[in-house]
Amino acid sequence: MALRIIATGGTFDKQYDPLTGNLVFRDSVLPAAIERARLTEPTSFEPLLALDSLDMQDEHREQIRAACERSAETQIVIVHGTDTMRETAEVLGRAGLDKTIVLTGAMVPCRIDGSDALFNLGFACAAAKLCAHGVYIAMNGRVFAWDDVRKNRGAGIFENTR
Amino acid sequence: MALRIIATGGTFDKQYDPLTGNLVFRDSVLPAAIERARLTEPTSFEPLLALDSLDMQDEHREQIRAACERSAETQIVIVHGTDTMRETAEVLGRAGLDKTIVLTGAMVPCRIDGSDALFNLGFACAAAKLCAHGVYIAMNGRVFAWDDVRKNRGAGIFENTR
Amino acid sequence: MALRIIATGGTFDKQYDPLTGNLVFRDSVLPAAIERARLTEPTSFEPLLALDSLDMQDEHREQIRAACERSAETQIVIVHGTDTMRETAEVLGRAGLDKTIVLTGAMVPCRIDGSDALFNLGFACAAAKLCAHGVYIAMNGRVFAWDDVRKNRGAGIFENTR
Amino acid sequence: MALRIIATGGTFDKQYDPLTGNLVFRDSVLPAAIERARLTEPTSFEPLLALDSLDMQDEHREQIRAACERSAETQIVIVHGTDTMRETAEVLGRAGLDKTIVLTGAMVPCRIDGSDALFNLGFACAAAKLCAHGVYIAMNGRVFAWDDVRKNRGAGIFENTR
């Protein structure tokens, strides 16, 4: 079955700007990451947004929801910033689309040594293929239901709310 | 639930020897790979073997089967060479253990630019958590049942036999 | 002849902090970088400071000058932020020490993909071995005298002033 | 002054072939390595050969000598396998060209974690700019005259013969 991977920004996709010394968004790193994965089934990539998740507003979440709704693929991985991943998951969860939607991201940008990005992308792709329709967050080697997850910012990990 | 990751060697774990110019086995790269994954659930690592899969004999497959049988964890990822991954999967499949066992590996060593190793490890960990008890191969972003998979060596990919 | 490498911070040594999303200083990356270089002559490493060069004050430059003065080695490489590398070079140049002192740094941190750090370190080490006593900046594959160099911040390069 | 960088193969440029599991030559990694160096002076790159240095014959050394002779640039870096780097240096040394020619290479391929390639390239470029006309080997953070160097294969290092 075909998979759609949607980029929305977040730490996963941050790149270093030598002139300012800041981490910024340029062309997404996801096409190169996907190529490394040596996938043999059709996979489409959609560079939808390039935002820090703290900058994500209701209108952006509506864009993400619309992208999921119009996706021909029913297995969707969304690469998203971690700080408001839960909020976007909630918007998608309440939308009740008949698809498997998995949000993931990274604590260390894909292009920095020691990043969790590729592991998380692989983990999320498997979750998108194997989980029942619904909305999930895949981080820290765990799959969370959208309505039972929060980011513990002090520890830098995702955990259950219940 | 707890996960066990078992190293048996294979391309995933190959490292460069500056003196001979060969790719060899040294201390497994898996502990560093697992640390990058930022897992929050208990995960045990077992460095069982360090073999090219073409060098793997019946006795080694029996060692792997025994390691799975005695594992306290029921979710097991085995990192294995790709060339005879199917043969080991068959031995494990016929053993009928009441566990979820997922074999994975890499087409490019973890420590070489552009490797698929971390993606595959993430993919396999999710499969080990989400699949029913049984034996699977997770490669190329797909989950294969142990009795319906082969490596197409010319193309360097895994595919169904049926 | 023996070489001394002194860390003072700067982009070269910046590392990513997953909790804040900022680039910060931790234990210097230089010991690992030096190990990769496979040097066969005695080389000492001194982690003197860990500062953005924009935060470097007169007192810090005095510390760097004192470190160069007391160095038993007469070939010295200083890893420094690029923004005020010229100012530190001037302090060292005016001090007139009877040593070869080469300042270098990086436009992209050593631990980020595509970094110029290791090339620059190698270039600076050769300059420290081959140049007459004096103070130099080694960046962009060039060796600049301390009194004929500036950073062009718009272009992100070092160039002559004359 | 302008610099010419000539690729002849060697460990520096070896890349992994996923289908055979061997380290092979493909398009040289040097253009990407040079781009990372952020050089601001004209630098030309010549992909002359792609050989293990153990496979290098007299005719290949003659090709390298001819490439140095016709080079418009008088500062030349040659990236070469380490095993017969000395032999090629001798051919070039005896040719007595009025240029500065520096041979370098790597003990670990550029695209493998922990490589010395970028350090060595930077070190060799500085040597090519700073040394008097002649032929040199730059390895292990040292500059050797062509007629006073050998590779100690047991230790994997270059050392003087006298």
Image: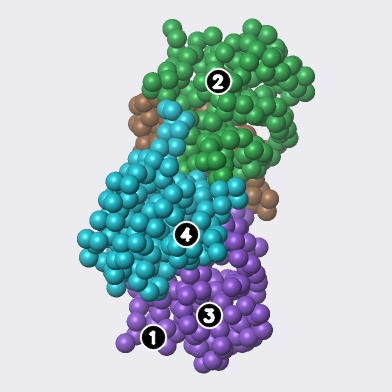
Chain colours: A cyan, B purple, C green, D brown
- Which residue position is annotated with label 4? A120
- Which residue position is annotated with label 1? B148
In-front residue for pair B158/B78: B78
Circle 1 Cα neighbour tier, 10 Å, few/some/many (<14 / 14–19 / ≥20): some
Are circles 4 and 2 on residues that touch, CB within 8 Å? no
- Tell me, yes or no, if residue D65 can be seen here: no
Q: Secondary structure at mark 1?
A: loop
N-term-proximal mark, 1 vs 3: 3
**Alpha carbon distance from label 4 to label 1:** 27 Å
- Which residue position is annotated with label 3? B101
Are circles 4 and 3 on residues that touch, CB within 8 Å? no
In the rendered image, residues at marks 4 and 1 fall on the same chain: no
- Which residue position is annotated with label 2? C54
State the image coordinates of residue B131 (x, y, percent, origin top left).
46, 79
Q: Give the quarter of the figure containing the C terminus of chain B.
A: bottom left
Circle 3 Cα neighbour tier, 10 Å, few/some/many (<14 / 14–19 / ≥20): many
**Alpha carbon distance from label 4 to label 2:** 36 Å
**Residue for point 60% across, 47% down:** A154
In this rendering, is residue A129 above or below D42?
below
Q: Give the quarter of the figure containing the N terminus of chain B.
A: bottom right
**Residue for point 55% across, 41% down:** C20
